[in-house]
Image (tube, grey):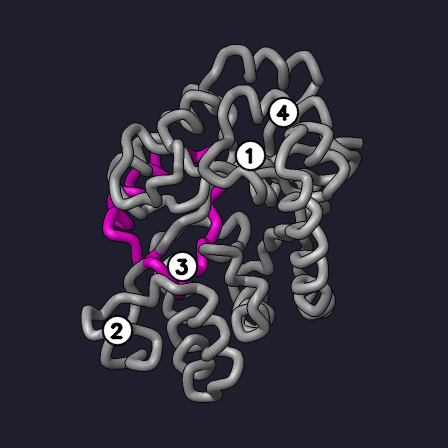
Amino acid sequence: MKSLIVTADDFGMSIPVNEGIEASHSDGILSTTSLMCGGDAFSDAVERARRLPNLGVGLHIHLVDSRPVLPPEKVPLLVGPDGCFSNNPEWFGFNLYFSGEMRRQAEAEIEAQFQRFEGTGLVMDHINGHHYFHMHPAVTDAIAKFAPRHGSPPVRYPVEPFWPSWEAGADKPVRRLFNWALYASLTSRMRRKLKNAGLALNDHIFGVNDTGAMTEKRILAYLDHLPDGVTELYAHPAKRMENQPQTYGSAEEYSGLVSPVVRAKIAALGLQPLTFKAVFSA
C-alpha cells in the first residue's frame, strides 16, 4: 500500500508564497501546507486557508530565519537587536541545546505558535519545523508536550530513504547518503519521544535533498520510486521570488506542482494526494 501526501512549507511567509500555495492546491496536486504563525503574510494565509476546506493546514514551527510570535522582549535570548530570530540554524541549535534559559524561552515561543494557530479556528493537520528544527531535542520535547492538547496531529519524519532517493535523482550520491545517515541518527530520539506521546509520523519523505529544486522532472522521478507506506513529498512553491534563498527555484517548483503531466502521472499510478489527517484516520 502506498499513500502520498504533497506538502508546501512556509505558508504565511509572503504573499507570493501564499499565492503559489493556493494555486498549487486549486490547480495542482498540493494536499497540505505548513503555516508559519509569525510570518509576514500570516493573516493572508489564514484567509486563503478558510476558503480551501480540502487543504490540510499544519503548524510550521519556526525559531530561525523569521520573527517570533511573542514580543521580542519575552524571548531576548532567541532574537537579535532587530527582534528577529538567528539566520544561523547550526549555531542557534548548538546554543539552544546547552542553555536552559534558551530552552525555556523556546518552549514559550512554541506554545505561543500553537496558540496562535488554534486562534485561527483551523484544524491542525500536522506539525513540522522550519529547517527541520523539530528534530532538535528542545523542540521535540515541546511538541510532545503541546501537541496532545491540540488534537495530537501527526508529525513530519524528515528522513529521505537513500536508495529510492538515489534511484530517482541519479545525482548527489554522497549528499543523499550523508543526509540519510545523519537525519536517521538525529531523529531516533524524536521518533521514540513522539510515539510515546501518541503522535503518528509518516514513513518516508522526498524533498530533503532537493529543497528548492522540486521541479516537474524531479517530482515525476520520485513518483516512479515511491516506497510502500506513507510518503510525504514537499516543496516551496511561490508565484515569484520574494524573501527566499537565492538557491530556491520556487517558481519552477510551483510549475511542477500544477503540471498536467504530473497530475496525469499521479492518476495513472492510482494515487490521490491526501492530508496527514486523512491518511492516519484511514
Determine which quarter of the picture holds residue 209: top right
Q: Relative to 251, is 173 on the left or the right?
A: right
Which residue in the structure is indicated by mark 1? 6
Percent from the top left, x then y, of residue 258? 45, 20
State the CA–CA distance, disc 2 to disc 1: 34 Å
Which residue in the structure is indicated by mark 3? 118
Name the one closer to the observer, 38 or 96.
Answer: 96
Residues under numbered marks 4 and 2 in contact, where contact means CB atoms less than 8 Å apart: no
What amino acid is labelled 4 in the image?
Gln
- Residue at position x 51%, y 25% from top? 29
Residues under numbered marks 1 and 4 in contact, where contact means CB atoms less than 8 Å apart: no
Is 55 contained in the magenta span? yes
- Specify the label residue 272 is tagged with: 4
Which residue in the structure is indicated by mark 2? 80
Q: Residue furthest left?
A: 82
Q: Nearer the viewer, mark 4 or mark 2?
A: 2
Q: How many marks?
A: 4
Q: Nearer the viewer, mark 4 or mark 3?
A: 4
